[in-house]
C-alpha cells in the first residue's frame, strides 16, 4: 500500500519535472520582461526571438507595488525591461531604480505620440517609452437606460438605483467625484476631499458592484445597466455588444499611461534597448495594441491599428499623481466609508 | 505519563522548533517592527518609530471594518460547522471503500484554481445565470433574482471555500471513534442522543476545534471572495490590508492592522479553546493553542 | 453504515453535488466559443488548442505540481513528527511553539509575502524554488500539525508503551502503532496543505523568480486583460488528470488489498 503511494507520487513528480524541463531550452542570451500576464501577443515575442536570437523570459506580477518591492529588493537588477503604471514609475525613478535610455540605440523614438510623453513622472522623456494608455469612461446599455447619460453627475441619478458598476481604484473614483464638482483629480485640500467624500456617499444606493477585473462583465450578464470602465474593458464589451453607448464624460477625463522602463542594473540592457527599438516599429506596435485593447501610444502605428484605439482628437485629461500623505489618508477614508455604505 | 530521564521524543521536536524560529519568529518580529515605522507613501517608510499607525486604527471607519469581519467570520463559521459536522461524521461511518471515494471527491475540486471556481459560482448566480433560468423555467419566479453582490452571496462563497477544511477535521477525529462502545452504550439502554453526547461528541470535539480554527481564521482575510461575490461592498479587514498595501502604498499602517488582526484572532481562539475546555468534553484541547 | 436511515447518504451525495456544481460549469465553459463567461455561444475546442500553444502556462503548471508536492511532503514530515513530539513531551515552550506555528494561518497573506521577501533578501537567499518551498512549507505545516494533533488527543498513550514493553524498538513502535493511528489525519492534512500550496498566489508572487513561476501567478496576473477561457480548459484537463492519478492509485491499492 505504501509502495503504491510512493510509486504514484514519484510518477506525478516526474511528470511535473517533464513539464518544467521540456520548456526550458539551452541557455542563450535572455531578455527578462517583467509585467502583467498577457500583455503581448505570442507572435510578437516569438518574432523578436527569431530576429535577434534573444530568448524572452516573461515574468509577471499582480500589482505595481509587488513589482516595485521586488525590484528594489533586487537592487534594480534581475529584470531587463519592466512595464508598469505611471504613478509607480514615478516612484521607481525617484528611488533610482530606472536607468536613462540610450536613445542612440532606439532610432524610432520619434514614433511615440507626444501626447503621452513629458508627463510628471518623466518630464524630459529620459526613462520611459509608453505602452498603451487608458481613459476610464462611462458605458451604458440603451435598452435599459432610456435617457441620455452625458457625464459623471448622471451616475448620481436616482433612476439608476442599484445598477451602476464601477472600477475599484480609490483614487479614480474619488477623482471622478472631484471632477463632477469641478475640482481637480489631484485635489490636495483635505476639506474639499471631505466634501467629495460626502458626495460619494450619495452615490452608494446606485452601486451594484465595485470591481477592477470584471466590472465590465456586469453590463453583459444583466447585473448592471451602466458601468464606469477602463479602456481595455470598454474594448471587450463593445466586441460582444456593439449597441452599448460610450460616453466621454463632459466634466473632464482622467488618463492613465503604462510605460516601459529599464531597471538601473538590468543584466541585459542591450537586449532591452533592442526590444524597445523593435516594439516602436509601426507594424509591431499595431499588433501589440490590437491585442492589448488600450489606446495606441505609438503615433506611427495609428493608421494600422483598430480605429477604436486611436486617441480621440479632443483628448485631454489629467493624470493621477501622488498627493500629500494627509490628502491620501482622506482619500482612503472616503473610499472605505463609501464601500461600506454600498452594502 | 512519568517523565523519563531523557525523553527520546525531544528529538522529534527539532524540525518544528527550527522552522518556527527561522520562518515564523523572524518574519513576525519584522512585521511588528514595521507596524511602528513611519509611512512615507508609495510603499516607502522610514524606521523612525511612531504610534501613529495604531492611533489611526482607532478611527471609527477602520474599527467598523474589524467588527464587520468578525461578524461575518462568526456567521460563516457557524454555518460551516452546521453543514460540515454531519458531513464529516457520516463520512467517517461509511465503509472503507466509501471513505476512500469521499476523500477523493473532496480532493478533486482542489485541482481547479479557487478563483476559477468562484467564476463558476458567478455564472451560476448571475442575473442571466443558470439558477435564475431554472427558477424562471419552473415558474417559481417571474423576474430574475439579484443574488450576486450581496451579503448572502459572500456567505455562500465563504462556506463553499472553507467547508472542506471543517469536513476533513471532523472526519479525521470522528474516524477514531470506537463504534463498539456506542453499540454497547445503546445495548445498555442509552438513548441515541445520549450515546452520541457522551461518547462521540467528546472524541470529535478536538476535530470541531481545529475545523473552527481552519475556517474562522481565513474568513477574516479572504478578501477576494468579498471582492468577487460581494462586489467589494462588504469591506473586510483582509481587503483593507490589501488596499493599503497596494494602491494605498502605506505599509506600516497595513502591518499595524495585521498585528491587531492577529491579536484579535488569537484572543478569540484562546477564549474559544478555554470555553470548550471548561465545558469539559475532552479535558485537553487540540495541540494548537 | 446505519441500516435503517437513508438520510445520511442522501446528505453526503447532495452536498457533494452542490460542491461540484461550479466545477461542472467551469468544465462546460471550457468548450464555450465565446471569450467571455457571460453567455454560451456554441461548442468549440479552440481554448484547448490555444492552451497547448501556451508553453509558459504549461511550464508553470509543472512548477506548481512540483512545488505543491514537495512542500506538502516536507510539511507532512515536519508536522507529523512535530505533533507526535508535542504530544509526548512536556516542555514549557511547547505551548508557545504550537501557537507560533499556527500564526501563518492568522497573518494576512500579503503581509506574509512581503515579510518573507524582506527576510529572504536579508539572508541573501536568491528567489526561486527554494524560497517558495520554504514559505509554502511554513504555511502548510499548521494544517498537518492541527489535524494530527487533534487526532492524537484522547488516543491511548499506553498502546505504544505496551509495544515497547513487549520488546519492540522505538522506531518499530512508532511505525507500527502510532503511524497507522494518525494516518487518516496525515492524509486529510496533506490534502489541505497541497490545496493551499497549489492555489497560493499572494505569497508566491513575492517569492517567485523570472525562471520559476507557478500556475496561480500566471492566472491571477492577467489583470490588465482579463482571465481567458484557456484557464478553464487547463482546469478541465487538470481535473481529468487528477481523477486519473487518483483512480490509478485507488485501483492499485484495491488490487494489493485483495492479494
Image (tube, coloured by chain):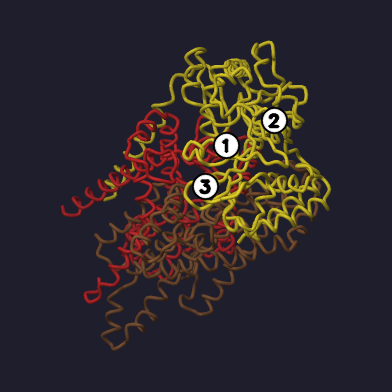
Please say if C226 is above or below C11.
Answer: above
- Is B194 in front, or is A277? A277
Label 3 marks a residue whose chain is A
Tell me what hue chain C is rendered in. Answer: red
Residue A267 on image: x %, y %? 62, 21
**B67 horizontally vs C244: left or right:** right
Residue A314's disc number: 2
Residue B201 on image: x %, y %? 40, 76
Residue A61's disc number: 1
Same chain, marks 2 and 3? yes
Please say if B47 is above or below B86.
Answer: above
Residue occupying the point 21% across, 53% down: C254
Residue occupying the point 57% across, 67% down: B269
Tag 3, which secondary structure? helix
Residue A27 can be seen in this image = yes
Q: Which residue is mark 3?
A: A219
Amino acid at each position: 500500500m505504501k509502495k503504491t503511494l510512493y510509486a504514484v507520487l514519484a510518477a506525478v513528480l516526474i511528470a511535473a519535472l517533464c513539464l518544467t524541463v521540456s520548456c526550458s531550452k539551452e541557455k542563450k542570451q535572455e531578455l527578462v520582461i517583467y509585467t502583467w500576464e498577457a500583455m503581448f501577443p505570442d507572435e510578437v515575442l516569438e518574432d523578436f526571438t527569431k530576429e535577434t536570437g534573444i530568448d524572452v523570459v516573461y515574468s509577471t506580477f499582480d500589482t505595481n507595488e509587488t513589482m516595485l518591492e521586488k525590484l528594489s529588493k533586487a537592487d534594480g537588477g534581475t529584470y531587463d525591461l519592466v512595464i508598469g503604471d505611471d504613478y509607480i514609475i514615478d516612484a521607481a525613478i525617484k528611488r533610482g531604480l530606472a536607468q536613462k535610455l540610450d536613445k542612440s540605440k532606439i532610432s524610432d523614438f520619434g514614433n511615440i505620440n507626444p501626447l503621452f510623453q513629458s508627463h510628471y513622472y518623466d518630464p524630459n522623456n529620459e526613462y520611459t517609452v509608453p505602452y498603451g494608455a487608458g481613459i476610464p469612461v462611462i458605458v451604458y446599455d440603451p435598452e435599459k437606460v432610456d435617457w441620455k447619460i452625458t457625464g459623471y453627475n448622471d451616475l448620481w441619478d436616482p433612476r439608476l438605483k442599484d445598477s451602476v458598476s464601477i472600477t475599484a481604484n480609490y483614487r479614480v473614483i474619488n477623482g471622478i467625484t472631484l471632477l463632477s464638482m469641478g475640482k481637480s483629480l489631484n485635489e490636495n485640500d483635505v476639506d474639499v476631499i471631505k466634501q467629495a467624500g460626502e458626495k460619494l456617499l450619495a452615490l452608494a444606493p446606485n452601486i451594484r458592484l465595485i470591481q477592477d477585473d470584471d466590472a465590465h462583465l456586469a453590463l453583459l450578464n444583466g447585473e448592471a445597466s451602466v458601468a464606469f470602465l477602463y479602456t481595455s474593458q470598454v474594448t471587450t464589451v463593445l466586441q460582444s455588444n456593439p449597441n452599448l453607448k460610450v460616453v466621454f464624460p463632459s466634466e473632464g477625463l482622467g488618463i492613465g499611461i503604462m510605460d516601459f522602463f529599464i531597471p538601473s542594473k538590468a543584466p541585459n540592457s542591450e537586449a532591452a534597448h533592442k526590444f524597445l527599438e523593435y516594439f516602436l516599429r509601426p507594424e509591431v506596435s499595431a499588433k501589440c495594441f490590437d491585442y492589448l485593447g488600450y489606446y495606441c501610444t505609438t503615433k506611427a502605428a495609428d493608421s494600422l491599428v483598430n480605429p477604436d484605439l486611436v486617441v480621440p482628437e479632443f483628448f485631454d485629461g489629467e493624470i493621477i499623481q501622488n498627493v500629500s500623505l494627509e490628502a491620501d489618508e482622506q482619500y482612503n477614508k472616503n473610499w472605505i466609508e463609501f464601500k461600506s455604505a454600498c452594502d | 505519563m512519568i517523565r523519563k530521564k531523557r525523553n527520546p521524543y525531544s528529538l522529534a521536536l527539532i524540525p518544528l522548533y527550527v522552522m518556527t524560529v527561522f520562518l515564523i519568529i523572524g518574519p513576525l518580529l519584522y512585521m511588528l517592527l514595521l507596524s511602528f515605522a513611519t509611512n512615507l507613501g508609495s510603499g516607502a517608510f522610514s524606521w523612525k518609530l511612531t504610534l501613529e499607525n495604531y492611533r489611526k486604527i482607532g478611527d471609527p471607519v477602520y474599527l467598523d471594518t474589524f467588527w464587520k469581519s468578525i461578524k461575518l467570520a462568526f456567521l460563516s463559521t457557524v454555518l460551516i460547522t452546521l453543514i460540515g459536522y454531519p458531513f464529516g461524521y457520516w463520512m467517517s461511518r461509511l465503509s472503507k471503500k466509501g471513505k476512500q471515494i469521499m476523500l477523493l471527491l473532496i480532493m478533486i475540486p482542489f485541482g481547479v484554481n479557487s478563483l476559477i471556481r468562484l467564476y463558476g459560482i458567478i455564472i451560476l448566480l448571475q442575473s442571466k445565470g443558470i439558477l435564475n433560468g431554472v427558477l424562471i423555467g419552473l415558474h417559481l419566479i417571474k423576474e430574475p433574482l439579484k443574488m450576486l453582490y450581496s451579503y448572502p452571496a459572500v456567505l455562500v462563497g465563504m462556506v463553499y471555500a472553507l467547508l472542506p477544511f471543517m469536513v476533513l477535521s471532523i472526519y479525521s477525529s470522528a474516524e477514531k471513534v470506537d463504534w463498539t462502545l456506542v453499540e454497547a452504550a445503546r445495548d445498555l439502554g442509552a438513548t441515541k442522543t445520549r450515546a452520541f453526547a457522551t461518547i462521540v461528541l467528546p472524541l470529535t470535539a478536538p476535530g470541531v476545534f481545529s475545523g473552527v480554527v481552519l475556517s474562522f481564521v481565513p474568513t477574516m482575510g479572504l478578501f477576494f471572495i468579498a471582492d468577487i461575490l460581494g462586489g467589494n461592498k462588504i469591506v473586510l479587514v483582509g481587503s483593507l490590508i490589501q488596499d493599503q498595501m497596494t494602491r494605498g502604498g502605506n505599509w506600516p499602517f497595513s502591518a499595524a492592522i495585521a498585528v491587531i488582526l492577529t491579536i484579535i484572532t488569537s484572543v478569540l481562539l484562546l477564549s474559544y479553546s478555554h470555553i470548550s475546555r471548561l465545558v469539559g468534553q475532552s479535558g485537553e484541547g487540540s495541540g494548537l493553542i | 453504515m446505519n441500516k435503517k436511515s437513508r438520510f445520511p447518504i442522501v446528505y453526503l451525495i447532495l452536498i457533494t453535488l452542490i460542491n461540484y456544481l461550479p466545477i461542472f460549469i467551469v468544465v462546460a465553459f471550457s468548450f464555450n466559443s465565446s471569450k467571455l463567461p457571460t453567455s454560451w455561444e456554441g461548442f468549440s475546442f479552440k481554448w484547448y488548442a490555444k492552451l497547448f500553444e501556451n508553453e509558459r502556462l504549461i511550464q508553470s503548471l509543472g512548477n506548481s505540481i512540483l512545488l505543491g508536492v514537495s512542500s506538502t511532503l516536507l510539511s507532512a514530515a515536519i508536522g507529523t513528527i512535530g505533533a507526535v513530539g508535542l504530544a509526548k513531551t512536556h516542555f514549557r515552550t511547547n505551548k508557545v511553539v504550537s501557537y507560533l506555528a499556527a500564526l501563518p494561518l492568522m497573518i494576512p497573506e500579503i503581509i506574509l509575502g512581503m515579510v518573507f521577501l524582506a527576510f529572504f533578501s536579508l539572508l541573501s537567499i536568491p528567489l526561486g524554488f527554494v524560497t517558495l518551498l520554504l514559505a509554502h512549507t511554513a504555511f502548510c505545516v499548521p494544517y498537518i500539525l492541527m489535524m494530527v494533533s487533534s487526532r492524537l488527543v484522547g488516543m491511548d498513550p499506553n498502546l505504544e508503551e505496551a509495544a515497547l514493553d513487549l520488546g519492540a524498538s522505538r522506531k518499530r513502535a512508532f511505525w507500527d502503532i502510532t503511524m497507522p493511528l494518525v494516518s487518516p489525519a496525515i492524509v486529510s492534512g496533506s490534502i489541505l496543505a497541497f490545496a493551499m500550496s497549489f492555489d497560493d498566489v499572494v505569497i508566491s508572487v513575492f517569492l517567485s523568480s523570472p525562471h520559476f513561476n507557478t500556475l496561480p501567478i500566471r492566472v491571477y496576473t492577467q489583470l490588465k486583460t482579463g482571465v481567458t477561457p484557456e484557464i478553464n480548459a487547463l482546469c478541465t484537463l487538470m481535473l481529468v488528470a487528477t481523477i486519473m492519478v487518483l483512480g490509478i492509485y485507488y485501483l492499485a491499492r484495491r488490487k494489493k488489498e485483495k492479494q
